[in-house]
Image (spheres, grey):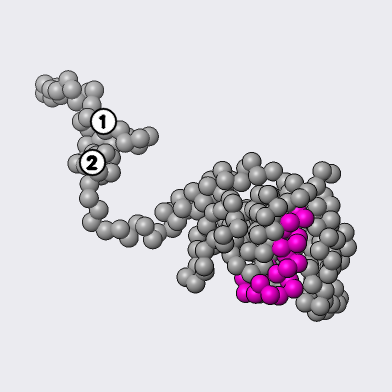
Amino acid sequence: MADEKIPAESHDEPLGTTYHRGPVIMRGPMIPTDTTTGNLLAPEGSTDWLHMDPWRVLRIQAEFVDGFGALAELGTAVSVFGSARTPRTDPMYRAARHVGRKLAEAGVAVITGGGPGIMEAANAGAAKAGGTSVGLGIELPHEQGINKWVNLGMTFRYFFVRKTMFVKYASGTIVFPGGFGTLDEAFELLTLVQTHKVARTPVVLFGTEYWQGLMDWLEGTVMEAGNISPLDPELVVMTDDEDEAVRVAMSEIGR
């Protein structure tokens, strides 16, 4: 029987033309009828992809990039946490404003959550003293936005990205009385300090009457149950003295 004749082109491309889509190779029936550029420019039939995790990852990445870009050249800074509900007539408001001013006078930037109350007070103290007054806000349904004393601000969608900025760019933290948000920020930092995930970062709890019960519970019930190690007295300090708070918060700067 004579050999069957096979077209010459079949020896070269037995499955037909090769199609490249990035690093992916497709041939024969796998070759798509659309193109990458065509898909990019085509009108969207559905926007469900906006609410899927891969797209959220890109938004999270963008927030980190924007935050790092905004704060990379900030210089030495101290974070100040506290309640958004503290009225301007409260002694704690006046103390936070004093702290913001003293930090600015020392050439240290002040980072807050950018809201009202204690945050506004610390920002006002820093801004009026000619310092860098940073506000890192959070996108919430009932938040009033960034306070008017912030001269470098950013609003975040994700709490964990925002908290990374507080920790990454601050050499110390002063925690005024506050609620769940303040406690969340304080315990985030205390966890990182106790597990040595960050360099030595002093934490000042301002207002001994407010914080004493919490510290008694931590150093009593929690420690006696073996659930935490003793807190470093040089890194976790309670005080009612604004100047001492500033001194402790700045104690690791320049070391």
Label 2 crowding class (10 Å Cα cut-off): few <14, some 14-19, many 20+? few
Q: Which contiguous range is marked in magenta?
A: 82-103
- Residue 254 point in image, percent of width and height: 82, 43
Q: State the SS at label 2.
A: helix
User: Would you say 125 lies left or right of 12 here?
Assistant: right
**Residue 38: numbered disc:** 2
Residue situated in front as seen by the camera: 40 or 29: 40
Q: Which residue is mark 1?
A: 18
For label 1, count other residues whose C-alpha is less than 10 Å away and answer few (under 14), some (14-19) or many (20+): few
- Callout 2 amino acid: Gly
Residue 245 location (% of width, % of height): 81, 61
In the rendered structure, does residue 200 fall within the stretch colored magenta?
no
- For the N terminus, the image quarter is top left
Question: Residue at left 41%, top 54%?
Answer: 55
Q: Which mark is residue 28?
A: none
Nearer the observer: mark 2 or 1; the answer is 2
Q: Residue furthest right?
A: 233
Tell me what residue is drawn at x 83 percent, y 69 percent.
Answer: 240
Q: Quadrant of residue 166?
A: bottom right
**Residue 72 showing in the rendered view:** yes
Residue 132 spot, x, y in % from top left: 66, 49
